[in-house]
């Protein structure tokens, strides 16, 4: 693996008595794409949010680019500028145009002048295939287009790392492909990416590694062909069988099988 860009050591996160993360150790190399998969409640989204301290860990350390985010004295705002985050929901300002949605954070956070911010916004809209939508408002865009605008907004900040939390889960199936195409482009460009996803085809084709989480721990971590194609753990096999064969999941639910749902 290349030089670690993200390092997670013995990470724990509790919400009251509920321990959601139970000692995560993980490294992601520079330019590496890691997809995190697992059932609902496994802790994967909480892990992602801990990487840029949207959730504060209960215990453990997080490093990005060699800087410890969990150090009490760290300038967290400065570190966060190096981390782009794309959520399930697009979080665009409805009263602003697409360009204004991209330039506002550049000007407020990075203090770029109006012309520079507009130029960088245009470049990144071109990257995600939406240059013609620069003057549109979010309400006139499809969900897939809005998510691509959200990705362009994150890219306009010049991040070294991109975090994606189920970026296609709120989209109609026919809109998923365009968003995944943009993420494939970023992978080819060498962007370090940590992606929480249920898109197994994307994980298998694009990820350098796949991490399977369940019950707040990493159960399996390896190449996509290993983890998805030939998993070594029964918990991974059970999850994938349910995910890849919805009819089987319905049968199991009908017979009262709640084993996997009760974990984490």
Image (cartoon, rainbow, N blue to C red):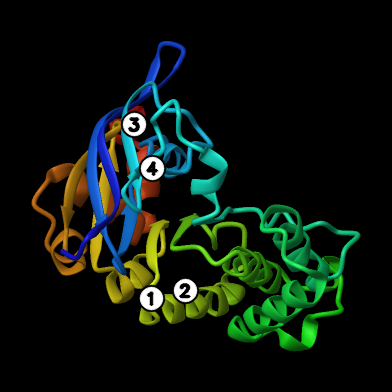
The picture quadrant where one finds residue 234 is top left
Give the distance between the C-alpha atoms of the residues marked 1 and 2, in whole angstroms.
Answer: 6 Å
Sequence-earlier tag: 4 or 1: 4
Q: Is residue 170 above or below residue 137?
A: above
Mark 2 nearby-residue class (10 Å; few <14, some 14–19, many ≥20): many
Sequence-earlier tag: 2 or 4: 4
The picture quadrant where one finds residue 114 is bottom right
Task: Nearest to the eye among marks 4 and 3: give it.
Answer: 4
Q: Is residue 46 above or below residue 35?
A: above
Q: Is residue 69 above or below residue 226?
A: above
Q: Please give the label number shown on residue 183.
A: 2
If the image is split into quadrants, where does the C terminus sit? top left
- Look at 62% across and 64% down and name the residue there: 171
Secondary structure type for disc 3:
loop
Query: Which residue is labeled 1 in the image?
Result: 187
Give the distance between the C-alpha atoms of the residues marked 4 and 3, in whole angstroms.
Answer: 20 Å
Query: Which residue is labeled 3 in the image?
Result: 258
Task: Nearest to the eye among marks 1 and 3: give it.
Answer: 1
Q: Please give the label number shown on residue 44.
A: 4
């Amino acid at each position: 693996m290349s030089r670690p860009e993200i390092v997670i050591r013995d990470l724990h996160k509790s919400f009251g008595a509920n321990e959601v993360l139970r000692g995560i150790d993980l490294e992601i190399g520079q330019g590496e794409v890691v997809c995190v998969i697992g059932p609902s409640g496994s802790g994967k989204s909480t892990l992602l949010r801990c990487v840029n301290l949207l959730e504060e860990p209960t215990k453990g350390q997080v490093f990005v680019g060699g800087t410890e985010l969990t150090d009490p004295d760290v300038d967290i705002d400065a570190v966060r500028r190096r981390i782009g985050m794309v959520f399930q929901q697009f979080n665009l300002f409805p009263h602003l145009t697409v360009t204004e949605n991209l330039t506002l954070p550049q000007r407020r956070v990075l203090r770029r002048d109006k012309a520079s911010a507009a130029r960088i916004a245009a470049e990144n809209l071109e990257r995600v295939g939406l240059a013609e939508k620069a003057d549109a408002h979010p309400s006139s865009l499809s969900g897939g287009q809005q998510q691509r605008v959200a990705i362009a907004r994150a890219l306009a900040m010049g991040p070294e790392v991109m975090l994606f939390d189920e970026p296609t889960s709120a989209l109609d199936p026919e809109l998923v492909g365009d968003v995944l195409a943009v993420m494939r482009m970023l992978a080819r460009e060498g962007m370090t990416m940590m992606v929480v996803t249920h898109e197994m085809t994307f994980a298998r084709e694009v990820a350098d590694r796949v991490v399977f989480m369940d019950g707040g721990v990493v159960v399996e971590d390896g190449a996509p062909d290993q983890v998805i194609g030939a998993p070594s753990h029964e918990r991974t096999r059970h999850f994938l069988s349910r995910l890849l064969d919805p009819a089987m999941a319905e049968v199991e639910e009908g017979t009262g099988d709640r084993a996997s749902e009760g974990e984490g």
